[in-house]
Image: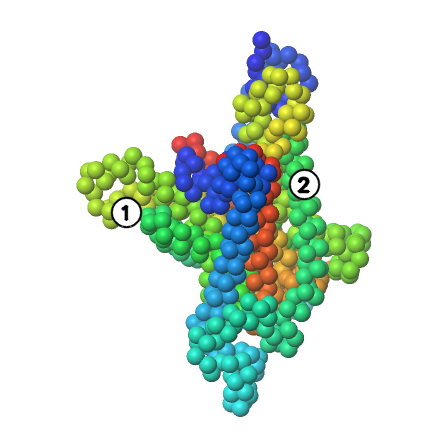
Amino acid sequence: MDDTRLQRGPRRGPRTGPHRSRLREPRRRAGLLRARAAGPVLAALASLFLLLAAVAPGWLAPTDPLAIDPAAAFQAPSAAHWLGTDESGRDIYARIVHGARPSLLIGAAATGLGLGLALVLGLVAGLGGRLLDAGVGRIVEVLLALPGLLLALVFIALAGPGVATTIVAVGLSTAPGYARIIRSQVRSLRGSPMIEAARVLGHSPARILARHLLPNALGPVMVLATLGIGQAVVWASALSFLGLGEAPPAPEWGAMLAAGRTYLGFAWWMTFFPGLAIVATAASSTVLGRALQRRAVAA
Amino acid sequence: MTEQALPGLPGGPGGPGDRAEGGLPHPGGTAVVPGRPWRAAGAWLLRRVGSAVFVLWAVATLIFLAIRLIPGDPAEAILGGPGSQASAEALAAARLEYGLDEPLWVQYLSQLGRLATGDLGTSYALRVPVAQLLTEQLPGTLALAAGAWVLAWVLALGLALWSGLGGRGAAVVGSALEIAAASVPHFWLGSVLVLLFSTAWGWLPPVSNGTAAGLVMPIVTLALPLAGFLGQVMRESMLTAMTSPFALSARARGESEAGVVLRHALRHAALPGVALSGWALGSLVSGAVVVESIFARPGLGRTLLQAVTLRDVPLVTGVALVSALAYVVVMALSDLAERAIDPRIRDR
């Protein structure tokens, strides 16, 4: 009896008998593998470009991102201005390239802050007794009840807008999610034979924490951070889009997009391309993060 | 495997399978307290109400503390911030009016007392009771969020069904769509939709003008990223279910593929979507702020944004409390929905 038909799950293509379908199987798989590999490669290339733009913007775009040229305002994309110009004749491509550094720095700083906070909360909850665990769980629950942007907005309302506020606000709003994951990591590691062995060998708690718990808990967290940086960049740019982040003349993607919306009717490139930069950042961090996650599962 | 379940870790405590709440049987369940379903239901309700009160108290307390910890004179904030250059007399009058000269704990207790009676205070900027502003703005946001939520579920379920039924393109289209949806920010998506449907083709109004046509683009903008996230977990769960032993046994009993998908796997696909409800609400609330500002649509989100710009603390606190309350309610509802969908939770 042909049991592949039962196990294969969803039937693909016409039912042509087991022989033919078995022949088709490898080809389909090869195609999927290729598609899977193409994503991370593209994402890695995009990330490389973004990093290069953040480290050496002048090398990728020699034009001054702040130089105004009223005669060249609102020019559509052309050979001279690859992605067009804005209302003051500033080159959009140069502004996007120069905007990479602040965007990535804010994203990385916010993710770092969120992870640091989450690490403290997660370790306390994971290693502490039941009371501590319950207490931290409550804090996390309250933070989760205020969704990302709302928490950030409340914080900005209290502390006033600005880059530092943006970093703290986005970091705060990402912390509860990470904290939950770190806690469950630490909890499941704590009871593992590896830790028990270290304890039996007489290692001090501090040594167990530093040598065994942290490295094992941090691996998956690094994957999450890769996934998270893109999201943090999106949130930070959302805040500047709303007029609460970096001030307009600075080349910042969210602020550029907001400025372009006034001229959406006839200068679509002012809105479209800065947004594309944000999407590329978020997408490549998502794809890379997922690829890392898959590798971690395979290992 | 859901997003939270991390690689290589068997479901340890705190993993996705280990829910802090739960454990009590469904009112209609028979397993744990046979014959006394109402007691269990009452306990469930009590626990939920308790958690709601706790979350609201904690949010109010956190904001109260934050205002006092962050440098700056609250009286000055009441009169329009440091830029207003209020006179010393005006500051003194504001301090007296808002009781800022009282000891901190008196201020704290009196604020909690006011909140407990439903008095959310008066907006600094608009000089209108916050509760009144919120009730005016809530319906618009509710319509937007509900519409987006329904659309997101329809899209995500459709995608899960498509891949469950073995649509060849579903995997490729699905994952591409999902990654795109997961990384496209609302503000860009909304702008691009306006660009296409209003500026280029003139099909839909670029601002939300109260008509049904004006609601289409805001809802789609809000729904697509959410649909991407939900579709991701639901499709994965559907595929896992389709290769599981129970699907195999259903097929062996002669169930058709469509029957396996609809009668057996669909529940499994829907579960992670339901479990993510609290998160989905967060995404809708955050998105509503952006979408309402893009489409110039009145609602809580735009009110919040204006309040943040003006540093109108009572109004911001009010919106935060409403959102926290909504989160608690949604979590309770999703708990009920999970029990209805998944007998394993019900009978635990």
| Residue under numbered circle 2 | B155
Front-most of residues B23 and B97: B23
Where residue A9 sits, quadrant-wise, is top right
Q: Residue at x 59, y 50 (%)?
A: B330
Residue drawn at x 40%, y 32% is A299
Q: Chain of mark 1?
A: A
How far apart are labels 1 and 2 at the CA level? Answer: 46 Å
User: In percent of the image, x 63 and y 60: which residue is there?
Assistant: B289
From where the camera sits, is residue B96 visible?
A: yes
Residue at the left extreme of this rendering: A202
Q: Considering depth in this image, is B68 or A18 the residue closer to the camera?
A: B68
Q: Find residue B249 and report its image quarter.
A: top right
Percent x, y for residue A56?
Answer: 46, 56
Tell me: residue B71, above or below residue A56. Answer: below
The residue furthest bottom is B89
Work out whether B93 lies above or below B41: below
Q: Which residue is mark 1?
A: A210
